[in-house]
Amino acid sequence: MQIRGNTLRKIINGLEAGDWSAKELVTAYANQAKEKQVVTHAFIDVHEEAALVAANESDQRRARGESRSRFDGVPIAIKDNLMVAGHRATAGSAILKDYIAPYDATVVKRLKQDGGIVLGKTNMDEFAMGSSTETSYHGPSKNPWDIERIPGGSSGGSVVAVAEGSAPAALGSDTGGSVRQPAALCGVVGLKPTYGRVSRYGLMAMASSLDQIGPVTRTVDDAALLLREIEGRDLNDSTSLEIKNEWRLPDSLSTSIKGLRIGLPKEYFVSGMEPGVETAVRATADRLTELGAELKEIELPHSKHALAVYYVLMPCEVSANLARYDGIRFGLRESGDSLEDTYCRSRGSGFGREVRRRIMIGTYALSSGYYDAYYLQAMKVRRLIANDFARAFSDVDCILTPTTPTVAWKLGEMSDDPLSMYLQDIYTVSVNVAGLPAITFPSGLSEGLPVGAQLIGRQFDEKTILGAAHTYEIAEGGFDRFLPPEIN
Ligand code: GLN
């Protein structure tokens, strides 16, 4: 069967109409995933056998008229920092290279309960730290638009799988941009939900006050479908919330933005951005005006500190969260002469350079004498950044920005230059710092490579940003032109 460019919606409709079976779907996607694995390396593991068993069960249920939900029989790719019971969960790290997940993450459990099928685990930067997938222990993924370029990160594998058509949709995690940045660089849709909308139980924690799980899809409509499937209160994650009625997404997204007030932050359209990126995003802004939106320049004066705040708070939380990988409780153990020696050897050889760098920075920033100067100070500026957004949202309904300052760069170009790599997160981190929802969608091409535009919304107002992005998508005749060229 033909699977390239298929949307989640199309797959679901086809299953319901009997155009294809779950078994046919899983077979086609698993073959594609395996075939591309050696070219673009989206997947770490393809769970072909388990997925085929699940597909047969799904087909039998459907034949009996007992389908569990519209997701029954739908294959989804899962980032490797999410638990899928009985399968390897490495988070892209040597320290967990043989670790088998003992339970399902809540998002995975919900999908499975509804008949959804895990197609496999996707490649990622080690413990989600990076913007290129180059820090993965398994080696980098490649951008399907040009395999000499990075796909972005850290959810690079999930994004490549969807962009090249090895999976109709995927889940990633976003702590500072890890769903949105790769989605932008590969020409797909990526959604970072409001902090608290989706349970993180079973997601390997990176920075707990920033982490969210989000959908990677070909269309905005698909992102809404998948979000509805995974969202909501979970007793295993005390930060997750019951979805109130006014937060709920309608089954069909809005297709009108008449009178919608969209803010353009003047701090986001300054030097450092590639001209091609600016041109594309400004053209998207113009298109939104033609469609009836009202554009307003706004100010987010503290956004210039967002990267600094993120790169203090995130490593602090990383240093605490990664303390558990001690060679005793999880994963790799390298025995030494004493307990401390065992810790040192296991962590020293199990963690890669970027992870070690962040643990050291975080431990330093939290240490006595420095805590007030770094962590506490960053927490105060975090509040100011959140206040900027709150103020802006009294004037506008959502905010449009570029998702990334550049298009995809060449593999290796920045891997020895952490600071340049961190600068790539300039437009995405504020959203996590303030706990807001944001979506990236294809905005245009620059030098033949995809550019993403980002819409940021009020807390729990995913409805508005999804509706606006969907309106744009419909007006543009869909995002089919963002299907990467076929590579063999
Ligand atoms: N690129 C960012 C970082 O390296 C974001 C990572 C993420 O969202 N997981 O921290």
Image (cartoon, rainbow, N blue to C red):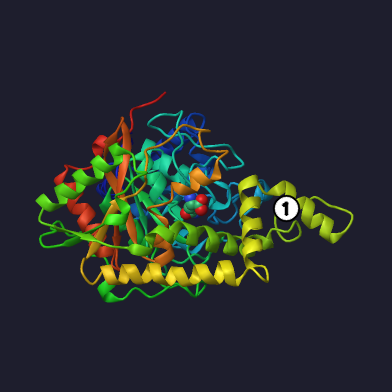
Residue 327 lies left or right of residue 410; in this view the side is right
Residue 466 location in percent, x, y?
25, 58
For the C terminus, the image quarter is top left
Q: Is residue 333 visible?
A: no
Give above or below for 55 relative to 371: above
Residue 484 location in percent, x, y?
33, 32
Residue 16 location in percent, x, y?
27, 50
Q: Nearer the viewer, residue 457 or 484?
A: 457
Q: Nearer the viewer, residue 41 or 17?
A: 41
Q: 10 Å neighbourhood of mark 1: few (<14), some, or many (≥20)?
A: many
Q: Is residue 9 visible?
A: yes
Residue 244 lies left or right of residue 131; in this view the side is left
For the N terminus, the image quarter is top left
Give above or below for 410 relative to 335: above
Give above or below for 468 relative to 242: above
Who's the residue at 47% across and 58% down the image?
A: 108
Distance from mark 1 CB to nearest ligand 1 atom below 8 Å: no
The residue labelled by disc 1 is 347
Quadrant in the picture for residue 418: top right
Who's the residue at 81% across and 55% down the image?
A: 342
Who's the residue at 35% across and 60% down the image?
A: 227
Mark 1 element type:
helix
| Residue that lies at the very extreme toward the right in this rendered image | 337
Quadrant in the picture for residue 197: bottom left
Residue 474 lies left or right of residue 317; in this view the side is left
Circle 1: residue type: Arg
Quadrant in the picture for residue 283: top left
Residue 58 location in percent, x, y?
40, 52
